[in-house]
Image: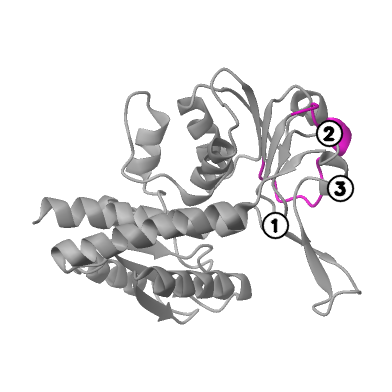
Amino acid sequence: MATVIDGKAVAQTIRSEIADEVRLLSQKYGKVPGLAVVIVGNRKDSQSYVGMKRKACAELGIKSFDIDLPEQVSQAEVINQVHDLNANPDVHGILVQLPLPKHINEEKVLTEISIEKDVDGFHPLNIGKLAMKGRDPLFLPCTPKACIELLQRSGVSIKGKKAVVVGRSNIVGLPASLLLLKADATVTIVHSHTSQPESIIREADIVIAAAGQPMMIKGNWIKPGAAVIDVGTNAVDDPTKKSGYRLVGDVDFQEASKVAGWITPVPGGVGPMTVTMLLKNTLDGAKRDIEQNN
């Protein structure tokens, strides 16, 4: 049976490390990290994610700035808000909650975020540096960073291993593959046009599943002893639940946990870690800024 990687417990450990550092900054410089979240419209998933961020900031002593904009807001107004936050010295991290409404160009908005405050790690300059050997981005994207952190803190070695990333999104799949490459894994990306994905996944020592397809990866696709990080969060109908649904990953957990060496559950795996990495990025941005200017 696989070792189940407890994302909540790892996140808690990292959060107490962050809280200690926030306290030190406050004592030494009288300043604390500040995180601004810009949210447009009222998607339920975005609202709940933003709620989690607010609560986490409060617990760790990070100051939270909330910019709630209506669904119909103009692109120019969103960019104005970003510019105001860029100029605000108490804000060390700016996060624009994606997806944005259809009439707003995501790339234009994200490119306006100051690279020093890009705690999501999605600025083209940060992603570009991530893709280049011997360059270091100021920030790493939160979910891919969470995947690597879970592997490392569970004692899984990455160097020289065969890693397969399922999915190639800008938010998870692509940057996760670049991070694995930086950690000296041999990386293959499986996507919707890959033929016979199962034969490729079966060779992997490390699998990062981020395809957004419920339970697509079966137990017999997993190499015995492999480490499986499941980023998928899919709602499937479940009449026995009060909400009428339950969350499942991209991996069939029941089957895969009999074969894998390590596996993350859904929920309780990557999820709690993603918000924690955002807070860590905010702390790192604040430390860079406060130590340079004092």
| Residue 38 drawn at (x, y percent) | 40, 71
Residue 198 appears in which quarter of the rendering?
top right
Indicate the amino acid at tag 3: Gln
Residue 124 appears in which quarter of the rendering?
top left
**Quick one: 14 or 119, which is closer to the camera?**
14
Q: Is residue 224 magenta?
A: yes
| Residue 29 drawn at (x, y percent) | 14, 63
Q: Label 2 to label 3, Cα distance in Å?
A: 10 Å
Neighbours of disc 1 within 10 Å: few (<14), some (14-19), many (20+): many
The numbered dot on residue 290 is none
Residue 293 appears in which quarter of the rendering?
bottom left
**Quick one: 241 or 59, which is closer to the camera?**
59
Mark 2 or 1 closer to N-term? 1
- As helix, strand or loop, the secondary structure at mark 3 comes to helix
- Closer to the camera: disc 3 or disc 1? 3
Instruction: Give the residue pinned by disc 1.
Output: 233
Mark 3 or 1 closer to N-term? 1
Q: Where 235 sits versus 163, above or below?
A: below
- As helix, strand or loop, the secondary structure at mark 1 comes to loop
Instruction: Give the residue pinned by disc 2.
Output: 259
Mark 2 or 3 closer to N-term? 3
Tell me if I can see residue 108 in this picture: no
Q: Which residues are magenta?
A: 209-225
Instruction: Give the residue pinned by disc 3.
Output: 254
Q: Label 3 to label 1, Cα distance in Å?
A: 16 Å
Left or right? Give the position of 223 relative to 45.
Answer: right
Identify the residue at image location x=49%, y=68%: 103
- As helix, strand or loop, the secondary structure at mark 2 comes to loop
Indicate the amino acid at tag 1: Thr
